[in-house]
């Protein structure tokens, strides 16, 4: 089975999505996964320390490449593969509210939204895991410095030993690779990540509803359900 996986800039559901695709690859080494990464997606993959996992899921061989949006050009020609029958399914997980809104409105001006448009035209089933469906969600944040706890030490071990030099009086998330070394180095426990509760905006919930009505697109509530859909696809294709 040949899958295409689109990663957008959401931190919510990101780790869970990686775990599912690692499970898919481990369960059947013959499954090929091409990964499409948006500009924002590239940043959050690094922030959450998931670059090695990404290279495990897509090792760089044919139909297992990692396509970064910043390298694809405005015409994103690689999405033409969806018109050539190269993939059995396209999975977008996680999908930011911005990506969801664009797809719901038929806009295809990024690597991910263009992939969805081409997949729909090529008859390739699309599965999308939106981060903002309805109500409240709990989302895991990247590492940050709690200013109320930080003692502003003259000698700061987290800052001195950060391999990416991402720490000053705050953490530069565009440099941070999510290794977590800084957490144990801070004597005062001022560096941490953690879960936060977020309210889903009405407009985002409405866009998800619009998404459900589009032909060829299936909205999935959470990444855990991806494995089940992949298994069903394999049965249909008699893998």
Image: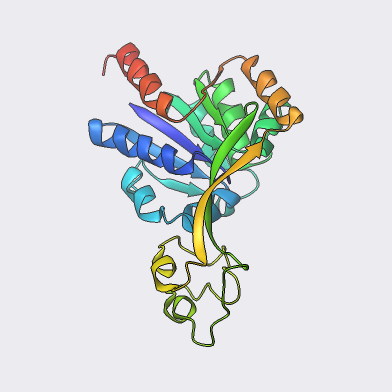
Name above or below for residue 99 compared with residue 58.
above
Identity of the residue drawn at 60% across and 70% down? 170
Q: Where is the C terminus found, in terms of image quarters?
A: top left
Identity of the residue drawn at 54% across and 56% down? 43
Q: Where is the N terminus found, in terms of image quarters?
A: top left
Q: In the rendered view, how is the structure colored? A: rainbow
- Res 188 seen here: yes
Image location (x, y in percent) of residue 81: 48, 32
Instruction: Give the mark count.
Output: 0
* Apparent side of residue 162 relative to residue 98 in the rendered image (left or right): left
Place residue 223 in its image quadrant: top left
Q: Nearer the viewer, residue 103 or 114?
A: 103
- Res 63 seen here: no
Name above or below for residue 43 compared with residue 153.
above
Place residue 65 in its image quadrant: top left
Identity of the residue drawn at 41% across and 52% down? 50
Q: Nearer the viewer, residue 194 or 163?
A: 194
Image location (x, y in percent) of residue 190: 52, 67
Name above or below for residue 92 compared with residue 145.
above
Q: Nearer the viewer, residue 176 or 197?
A: 197
Q: Residue furthest right?
A: 203
Image location (x, y in percent) of residue 8: 56, 43
* Apparent side of residue 228 relative to residue 9 in the rendered image (left or right): left
Q: Residue furthest top?
A: 236
Image location (x, y in percent) of residue 122: 54, 21
């Amino acid at each position: 089975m040949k899958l295409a996986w689109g990663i957008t800039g959401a931190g919510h559901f990101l780790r869970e999505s990686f775990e599912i695709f690692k499970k898919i690859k481990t369960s059947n080494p013959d499954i090929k996964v091409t990964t499409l990464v948006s500009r924002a997606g590239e940043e959050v993959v690094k922030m959450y320390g998931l670059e090695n996992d990404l290279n495990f899921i897509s090792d760089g061989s044919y139909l297992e490449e990692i396509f970064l949006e910043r390298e694809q050009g405005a015409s994103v020609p690689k999405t033409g593969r969806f018109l050539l029958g190269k993939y059995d399914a396209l999975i977008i997980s996680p999908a930011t509210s911005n990506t969801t809104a664009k797809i719901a409105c038929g806009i295809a001006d990024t690597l991910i939204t263009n992939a969805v448009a081409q997949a729909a035209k090529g008859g390739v089933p699309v599965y999308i895991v939106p981060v903002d469906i309805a109500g409240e969600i709990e989302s895991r944040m990247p590492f940050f410095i709690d200013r109320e706890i930080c003692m502003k030490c003259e000698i700061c071990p987290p800052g001195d030993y950060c391999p990416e030099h991402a720490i000053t009086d705050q953490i530069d998330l565009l440099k941070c690779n999510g290794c977590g070394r800084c957490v144990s180095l801070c004597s005062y426990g001022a560096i941490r990540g953690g879960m936060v509760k977020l309210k889903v905006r009405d407009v985002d919930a409405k866009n998800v509803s619009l998404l459900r009505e589009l032909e060829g697109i299936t909205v999935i509530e959470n990444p855990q359900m991806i494995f089940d859909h992949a298994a069903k696809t394999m049965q249909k294709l008699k893998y």
